[in-house]
């Protein structure tokens, strides 16, 4: 019992990224914590059907691509990839990540309760499991039940020919032709991965523009490379019905415009819906907004003072995009807020990534956003083909773009397409957070050969455009560099 007479200070419902980090944060604050999930060990969609699955699949595909790039068809490189080759690696990654999650919870004394939580009142849930039912009480609750693929009555997902993203790896073999409905984050990623493996992909979306929050030059480059892989775009088209034509042995997607598209299989990736329908939210006076999502305030609190929510279940950022990294931060912030612990975050410098082939990542402002806000800016670009690392890994089409203020040289945004984009974006993120200028990158030594060198190349390109040269100095940058150098001198003397 806690000091208030409840079983726990906090009960987290859902073990996805938001739930895990929220529970661990509360445990570190000395609170008595439990996580309820339908099945243990678990990591929710983030492990079993979402982030870990798609990103592990991507690495497996990249291995094949790199072999083809360097050794070609004359070597013993397997061009035909079986589903077993892909799922084997995915299963190993899931097992390892699940064990890590379980170990973290156990080490921090977070209780794990198996079963489905149903609210009885604002301070108690009935947990129903195969082995029975129990009442669990708590001072506070964090709802982090995540989301699942959207369903449509007109598109019957049989799990064989018409699939949702969670069912894709259940296929015994890759289809020759695949229709993907939905060009959001999931649809885009799978389109690029499967096209790389030789699947003929048709990408259908009712929007006329892809990834509107991404820099337009990056998107144009990305779409061009997908077309090179054979992806067909059908934008501005809405799929209104879908069925298997047994006679022609194909899937037929009927379009609102009156046409149709045929393919061997169809992947329906038109969004996700919050897993709130089984929580009995009516018992605590809570309702949901569109898509089964929960509405929260800036502190992640619902309309019920002791019930908070975080992760996919509170909605999406843009265009149906879901990010495990941001869900984790939301879980931490929600717990800090509920227990009165000061916590800050900087959503304006959150990094975003599209784990497609090629990889895309960004942080800060975009060119279109700066133009709309009438903020002056200039651009510095570094092409991967000019980097030794780009030649080593065979990426001669990627590039890094720095957006900066032409007067102060302050970094405004970083946009990358190509190998390791989601990794090296964090250098730009740090620069934005600490108010760095182009001169920081000019004056910094990067390991060689690395993709990080692109920052120096882009900075030099930008400095040439504004005529700053190598003589222009800013006191803040110089002071930081000098402080760092003085520290190194002292360390050398001490040694």
Image: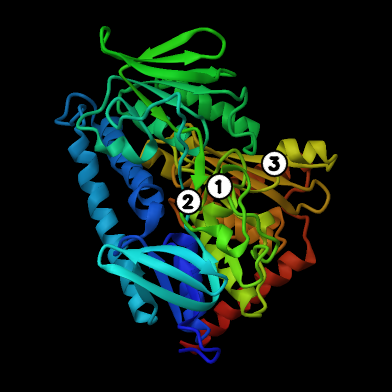
Apparent side of residue 455 relative to residue 99 in the rendered image (left or right): right
Mark 2 or mark 1: name the one nearer the start of the chain.
2
Q: Quadrant of residue 369?
A: top right
Please identify, in this view, whether the residue under mark 1 or under mark 3 is nearer the observer: 1
Q: How many marks?
A: 3
Mark 2 or mark 3: name the one nearer the start of the chain.
2
Please identify, in this view, whether the residue under mark 2 or under mark 3 is nearer the observer: 2
- Residue 292 is marked as 1
Relative to the observer, which residue lies in front, 202 or 392? 202
Q: Residue at x 26, y 12 (%)?
A: 246
Apparent side of residue 47 relative to residue 95 in the rendered image (left or right): right
**Colour option used:** rainbow
Q: Is residue 459 above or below residue 280?
A: above
Q: Residue at x 62, y 31 (%)?
A: 217
Instruction: Name the residue beneath numbered marker 3.
Output: 366
Q: Residues within 10 Å of mark 1 (few under 14, many from 20)?
A: some
Q: Where in the figure is residue 220, as x and y percent of width and height?
A: 58, 26
In three-dimensional space, the C-alpha distance between marks 2 and 1, rounded to whole angstroms, equals: 7 Å
Q: Residue at x 59, y 64 (%)?
A: 284
Q: Residues within 10 Å of mark 2 (few under 14, many from 20)?
A: many
Q: Under tag 3, what secondary structure?
A: loop
Q: Where in the figure is residue 242, as x and y percent of width and height?
A: 41, 19
Q: Is residue 448 above or below residue 13?
A: above
Q: Where in the figure is residue 81, as x and y percent of width and height?
A: 21, 31
Residue at the bottom extreme, as displayed? 3
Q: Residue at x 51, y 37 (%)?
A: 271
Q: Where in the figure is residue 7, as x and y percent of width and height?
A: 45, 83
Pointers 2 and 1 in contact (CB under 8 A)?
Answer: yes
Mark 1 or mark 3: name the one nearer the start of the chain.
1
In three-dimensional space, the C-alpha distance between marks 1 and 3, rounded to whole angstroms, equals: 31 Å
Instruction: Name the residue beneath numbered marker 2.
Output: 275
In three-dimensional space, the C-alpha distance between marks 2 and 3, rounded to whole angstroms, equals: 33 Å
């Amino acid at each position: 019992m806690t000091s208030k007479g409840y079983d726990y200070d906090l009960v987290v419902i859902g073990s996805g990224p938001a739930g895990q980090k929220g529970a661990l944060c509360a445990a570190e604050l000395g609170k008595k914590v439990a996580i309820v999930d339908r099945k243990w060990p678990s990591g929710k969609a983030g492990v079993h059907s979402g982030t870990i699955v798609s990103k592990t699949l991507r690495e497996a595909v990249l291995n094949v691509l790199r072999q083809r790039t360097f050794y070609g068809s004359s070597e013993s490189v397997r061009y035909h990839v079986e589903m077993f080759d892909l799922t084997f690696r995915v299963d190993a990654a899931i097992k390892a990540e699940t064990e890590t999650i379980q170990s973290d919870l156990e080490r921090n004394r977070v209780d794990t309760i198996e079963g489905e939580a149903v609210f009885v009142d604002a301070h108690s849930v009935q947990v129903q499991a195969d082995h029975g039912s129990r009442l669990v009480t708590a001072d506070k609750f964090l709802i982090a039940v995540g989301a699942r693929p959207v369903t449509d009555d007109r598109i019957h997902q049989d799990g064989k020919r018409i699939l949702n993203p969670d069912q894709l790896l259940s296929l015994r073999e890759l289809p020759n032709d695949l229709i993907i409905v939905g060009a959001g984050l999931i649809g885009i990623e799978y389109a690029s991965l499967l096209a790389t493996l030789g699947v003929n992909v048709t990408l259908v979306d009712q929007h006329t523009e892809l990834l509107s929050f991404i820099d337009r030059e990056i998107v144009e480059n990305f779409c061009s490379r997908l077309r090179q892989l054979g992806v067909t775009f059908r934008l501005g088209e809405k799929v209104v019905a879908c069925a298997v034509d047994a006679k022609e042995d194909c899937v037929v997607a009927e379009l609102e415009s009156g046409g149709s598209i045929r393919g061997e299989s169809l992947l329906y990736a038109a969004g996700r819906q919050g897993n709130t329908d089984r929580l009995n939210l009516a018992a605590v006076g809570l309702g949901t907004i569109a898509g089964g999502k929960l509405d929260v305030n800036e502190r992640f609190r619902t309309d019920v003072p002791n019930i908070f929510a975080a992760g996919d279940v509170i909605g999406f950022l843009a265009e149906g995009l879901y990010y495990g990294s941001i869900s984790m931060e939301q879980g931490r912030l929600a717990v800090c807020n509920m227990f009165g612990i000061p916590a800050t975050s900087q959503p304006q410098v959150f990094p975003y990534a599209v784990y497609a082939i090629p990889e895309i990542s960004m942080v800060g402002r975009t060119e279109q956003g700066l133009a709309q806000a009438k903020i002056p800016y200039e651009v510095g670009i570094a092409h991967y083909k000019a980097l030794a690392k780009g030649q080593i890994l065979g990426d001669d089409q990627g590039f890094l773009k720095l957006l900066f203020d032409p007067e102060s040289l302050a970094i405004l945004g970083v946009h990358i397409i190509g190998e390791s984009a989601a990794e090296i974006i964090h250098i730009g993120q740090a620069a934005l957070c600490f108010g760095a200028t182009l001169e920081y990158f000019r004056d910094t030594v990067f390991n060689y050969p690395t993709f990080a060198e692109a920052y120096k190349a882009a900075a030099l390109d930008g400095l040439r455009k504004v005529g700053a040269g190598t003589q222009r100095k800013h006191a803040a940058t110089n002071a930081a560099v000098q402080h760092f150098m003085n520290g190194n001198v002292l360390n050398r003397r001490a040694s």
